[in-house]
Amino acid sequence: MTTVKTVSSLEKIFPQSDGNFYDVSSLSMLIGERLNFQLAVNTDEPLRFTVSGAENLKLNSYNVGFVPSKLPFYSDHDDDIIESPDGYYPDVLYPTENGEVEFVNGGWCSVWFEAESEKAGVNNIVITFYNEDNEEVARSGIELKVINAVLPEQEIIHTNWFHCDCLATWYGVEAFSEEHWRIIENFMRVGNAHGLNMILTPLFTPPLDTAVGGERPTMQLVDVTVTGKDTYSFGFDKLTRWFETATRCGMKWFELSHLFTQWGAKHAPKIVDVNGKQLFGWKTRAGGREYVSFLEQFAAALKPYLESNGMKEKCWLHVSDEPNDMQVRSYGKASRLIARLFPDYKTLDALSDFKFYKKGLVKTPVPSLDHALNFRGKVDGLWTYYCCGQYKGTANRFMAMPSYRQRVLGLQLYKFGCVGFLQWGFNFWYSQYSKRRINPFEETDAGEAFPSGDSFVVYPGEDGQPIVALRYKLFYDAFQDLRALKLLDSKIGYDETVKLIENRTGEPLTFVNYERGIEAMLSKREAVNKAIEENI
């Protein structure tokens, strides 16, 4: 017996699901948009499927795979989570081969579809399932309406930290070898296809999520040559290649990696010379004479290089990540040094204490979602981020969160006029503090440190090709919602657009207050599409 249902991409389908899904029969999209939906399948035999009615669409299909979670959420989580019946969550999107369904004998599985079109019109899609004897056993369909309006370009700046060392470690390649460059480009392209347009650029090995006294594999784009006692010269050939590669992959902005260690800016990042000898690191005081002299020489070489290559306006500098209110002094000293060395360059850092901005220690603060409204109207362009700490009421991307909780981000970013969004884990495949490599197909919580899904949105596939998490598709849906809202705004204005996405509970939409449920999310986007169509 085979049962098939067409359902929203916002469903999370487990083998043990009761089949009571939110069915969909029709959805709408804009020209140039990518729309996702699923077919929930319950069967006890191998199946394959064919698709008809999609002649005007580009249609990709994926089998949804499951991964385990030992830490799906923290013990003091809110009540808007999904507990897995067996500790496994649907997350990996494996491209289908010959339309074959990866079925669970007697349980529910899912085939994920992603549709895109450059032509307006109605597409009546029918998906037919056959058994091994080529007998039809089920069929289902959906009407996809492509509205005659083009989804505008993405305006918001988005960075999701790109960890080159994790790529080298997983695939067993030398840092910045030709094979490493090939893999880097593959992952950059997939990131850009899902909204990534700013890339973390490892001038020196980024001092992020590293145990005090520990090291991450060396990832350094700048060649440093010791020319005398405390004097240096710098080579930028690899950095040039990085800029060229990233630009080719669609990147528009570059985060130059942090020049001081995380959580307080007390030490220098790991920096090696061209022979691999370590020059600076945990034993280096951030404000010590040797490192200050090094940064002065580095700035004197880097600035003319960036400016002569037209990169100055595309680059943002970092001081240190996530300083707290006990580290104002050390962060302030490092920040003032960078301001002196790079007086007219853009800087940004993830921090949620307004006093850092009030004291003039950071030009562009990036507060967490739950603190962002404290900065709204007080900063020149509101950025925000989420990570493992934003799990009470906020949007986030944990595997154990309902999918609408990820997608609502687009509505929030629009309403509050955010110009940038940051998240730290594009492909962090290490345990916490980078103490060991993990297999993300088997260990999804960085060694039971972060709720599963916080630290990566792509998996390492064969031949250096990324495999995308369904959560990444949902994240991109949020960005597409944001772009559609911008389009509608240009036609009917901000106030009228916000009315369409406000909560129907009478309480305003905020970063922690939004309507729960698949129906609420889908109906808001359909209302936006209808309004766009009416105002073409």
Image (cartoon, rainbow, N blue to C red):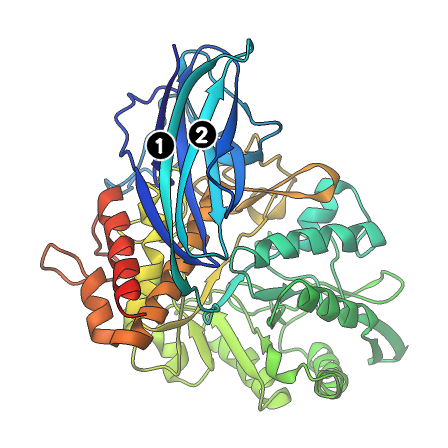
Residue 356 percent across, percent down from the top left: 41, 77
The image quarter in which residue 443 lies: top right
Q: Of 452 and 26, which appears nearest the observer?
A: 26
Question: Does residue 310 show up?
Answer: yes
Does 441 sit left or right of 496 as displayed? right
Q: For numbered disc 2, what is the local secondary structure?
A: strand
User: Quick check: 349 left or right of 466?
Assistant: left
Which label lies toward us, 2 or 1?
2
Q: Quadrant of the C terminus?
A: bottom left
Tag 1 residue:
6
* x and y percentages locating residue 532 in the rendered image: 30, 65
Secondary structure state at the residue bearing disc 1: strand
The residue at the point 67 percent across, 48 percent down is 166
Q: Is residue 70 visible?
A: no
Q: Is residue 240 left or right of residue 482?
A: right
Measured from the top left, where is residue 385 in percent x and y?
42, 62
Between 425 and 480, the one nearer to me in the picture: 480
Measure how far apart labels 2 and 1 are at the Cα level: 10 Å
Q: Position of residue 288 (x, y in %)?
A: 67, 78
Residue drawn at the location 71% of the way across and 63% of the way down: 270
Q: Count residues near mark 2 (Cα–Cα under 10 Å), then give few for <14, some for 14-19, many for 20+.
A: some
Task: Identify the mark at residue 127; answer none if there is no mark.
Answer: 2
Sooner in the amino-acid sequence: mark 2 or mark 1:
1
Q: Are marks 2 and 1 in contact (CB under 8 Å)?
A: yes
Relative height, residue 270 to residue 101 (above, below): below
Which label belongs to residue 83? none
Label 1 CA crowd tier, 10 Å (few <14, some 14–19, many 20+)? many
Q: Is residue 193 above or below residue 296?
A: above
